[in-house]
Image (cartoon, rainbow, N blue to C red):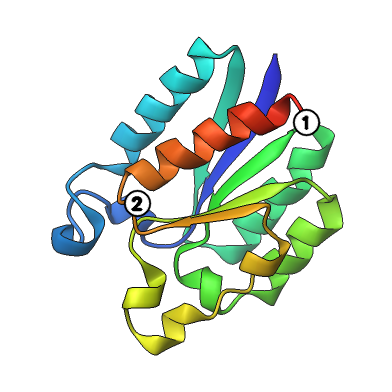
Amino acid sequence: MSNLLLLNGPNLNLLGTREKDIYGSSTLEEIESKLTQLAAENNIELNCFQSNAEHELVDKIQEAKKKDVKIILFNPGAFTHTSVALRDAILGVDIPMIEIHISNIFGRESFREKSFFSDISIGVISGLGEESYVSALDFAIKKIGDL
């Protein structure tokens, strides 16, 4: 069974209650449950983790190498635009990563257009709402066969 890691950064624990016009009404738990089920249907184990703390996300990325994670699905949230530490962690473990955003980061404030991850990602999915996660998982499932 292949192993994937879904990471979510700061404030994504507020999904379902936070700015529903931008982020939708699904909670993070609902999204994770749906993705875990879709992964299991494809004989893939999906481990999910969310934190508002940068160092906890760095720790999970570093642990991913030891746990033989094949691909990291990552919505860095606000860390997208600020975190060299998370970028370095991704580069340090040399695990393919897909960057995920619920909203269209290019259709919002100009500071959101800069990502510290896009150039090191195997793909970026942005602006599809909850479907951004589903599309990322679908691509990861297809990509696992190439690894």
Kindly identify the residue that appears in the image at 69 percent across and 39 percent down: 71
Q: Secondary structure at mark 2?
A: helix
Task: Find the distance from the CA under tag 1 to the CA under tag 2.
Answer: 24 Å
Q: Residue 15 placed where, x, y %? A: 27, 51
Amino acid, disc 2: Asn
Give 146 or 79, whichever is nearer the viewer. 146
Q: Residue 127 placed where, x, y %? A: 35, 59
Kindly identify the residue that appears in the image at 67 percent across and 49 percent down: 97
Kindly identify the residue that appears in the image at 28 percent across and 55 percent down: 14
Pointer 1: residues within 10 angstroms few (<14), some, or many (20+)?
Answer: few
Q: Disc 2 marks which residue?
A: 13
Q: Disc 1 marks which residue?
A: 67
Image mark for residue 6:
none
Pointer 2: residues within 10 angstroms few (<14), some, or many (20+)?
Answer: some
Amino acid, disc 1: Lys
Q: Residue 132 placed where, x, y %? A: 40, 47
Q: Secondary structure at mark 1?
A: loop
